[in-house]
Image (spheres, rainbow, N blue to C red):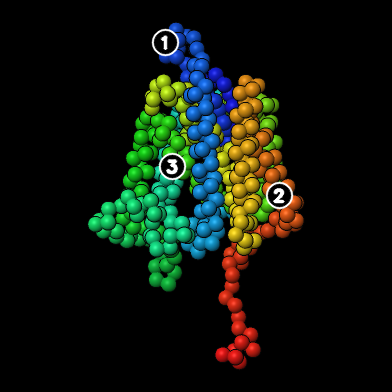
Amino acid sequence: MADVEQGAALPSGVPPPDVLNASAANGTDAANGTATRFVSTPEGTALAYGSLVLMALLPIFFGALRSVSCAKSKNSSDMPETITSRDAARFPIIASCTLFGLYLFFKIFSQEYINLLLSMYFFVLGILALSHTMSAVPESYPLYHTSPLMNRAFPTNLPNRQYQLLFTQGSGEAKEEIVNYEFDTKDLVCLCISTVVGIWYVLKKHWVANNLFGLAFALNGVELLHLNNVSTGCILLGGLFIYDVFWVFGTNVMVTVAKSFEAPIKLVFPQDLLEKGLEANNFAMLGLGDIVIPGIFIALLLRFDVSLRKDSRTYFYTSFLAYIFGLGLTIFVMHTFKHAQPALLYLVPACIGFPVVVALVKGELTDMFRYEESSLSEAEPAPKEETGLEKKEK
């Protein structure tokens, strides 16, 4: 879900799912009690929004590919979290309660202390998410213990030792495993790199560190959150469509929380990068909700493509292009009317409508809505049983 606001004071974090286009006030004017909005150049604006669109597409594309491997995985640590129709129906209500609760918290309690707690929470989550992103092994690389990226970066002469973290409860026959996690030296390297990024983010709140965590959150979300069928996806996207429109156009709650919330749950890119370099501070922002929510639906359609056992990935590419169209339309309308826009207002009809039209044309609409997530593992060709005649011929 998203809203775009122009000329607002720069927030350090945005609650999911929001888009903000914010500019920081000039330091001298702020000291005098006035604020002057920075007017970005056309080149800076195009660079910022083009970069945001590209960054949004990366976790959707690679997260969807990894979700296929995740659905087939037998490893308990990589098992996806399945969203049912009941979960999808409840989600907009839970999201609304959470959003309004945060709004009340920021009105009653000190913003500084709340954001300190949130920073520590997302510091830990960000380290784990970024570490998993770097170390996870795609199914297409079965010979690797870690990702191809780490195998290229890791020195070949450095030994890769195996470790196991085991916590048990009880003794003797009553002993029960609580935690049984296996990892190696490369996993520890990924954890150390992620920790450095986390410390950088906590101390500096730099936009590059924010984006590294944000991309990791988005990719892991698309990979590990699975819709069980297309109907559930329609319920989820439809509910959040209403949620987004109501909280953006109907109240100031989302914008108020967005300005107060500090957490790496958005992607940002400076519109004044060409003028100020890495120290730029006039950001265009894209909330992770506008990536993950459509992303898990696009990933579902990829798994549906796989279940059809065809060489084409028609529904995946259709929904992927629909997402690009919807996000581009959001940016266009925002700049045309100079008003905050909920991105799901445009993304939901595009991401659902385009694949449905394609399914109607191909005569596969019934198959699409009958597809269940559990059928993915059944899509693998089973070993062919020999008939009695074949055995006799042998």
Determine the residue positioned at 44% across, 69% down. Answer: 174
Left/right placement of residue 266 relative to residue 206 reads right
The type of residue carrying mark 3 is Gly
Front tag of 3 and 2:
2
Foreground residue among 15 and 136: 136
Q: Which mark is residue 126?
A: 3
Say few, some or many: other residues with alpha carbon within 10 Å of mark 1 (under 14 / 14 to 19 / 20 or more).
few
N-terminal of the pair, mark 3 or mark 2, is 3
The type of residue carrying mark 2 is Val
Q: Can residue 96 be seen in this view?
A: no
Foreground residue among 273 and 23: 273
The type of residue carrying mark 1 is Thr
> CA separation, marks 2 and 1?
55 Å
> CA separation, marks 1 and 3?
34 Å
Secondary element type, mark 1: helix
Q: In this view, does 243 lie above or below 232?
A: above
Query: Is the C terminus in the top left, top right, bottom left or bottom right quadrant?
Result: bottom right
Front tag of 2 and 1:
2
CB contact under 8 Å: marks 3 and 2: no
Foreground residue among 307 and 101: 307
- Expressed as whole percent of the image width and height from the top left, the position of residue 324 reads 60, 39
Q: Name the residue under label 1.
A: 28
Say few, some or many: other residues with alpha carbon within 10 Å of mark 2 (under 14 / 14 to 19 / 20 or more).
some
Q: Is residue 26 visible?
A: yes
Secondary element type, mark 2: helix
Determine the residue positioned at 42% across, 14% down. Answer: 27
Q: Name the residue under label 2.
A: 358
Determine the residue positioned at 45% across, 22% down. Answer: 272
Determine the residue positioned at 60% across, 83% down. Answer: 386
N-terminal of the pair, mark 1 or mark 3, is 1
> CA separation, marks 3 and 2?
38 Å
Q: Is residue 388 above or below residue 171?
A: below
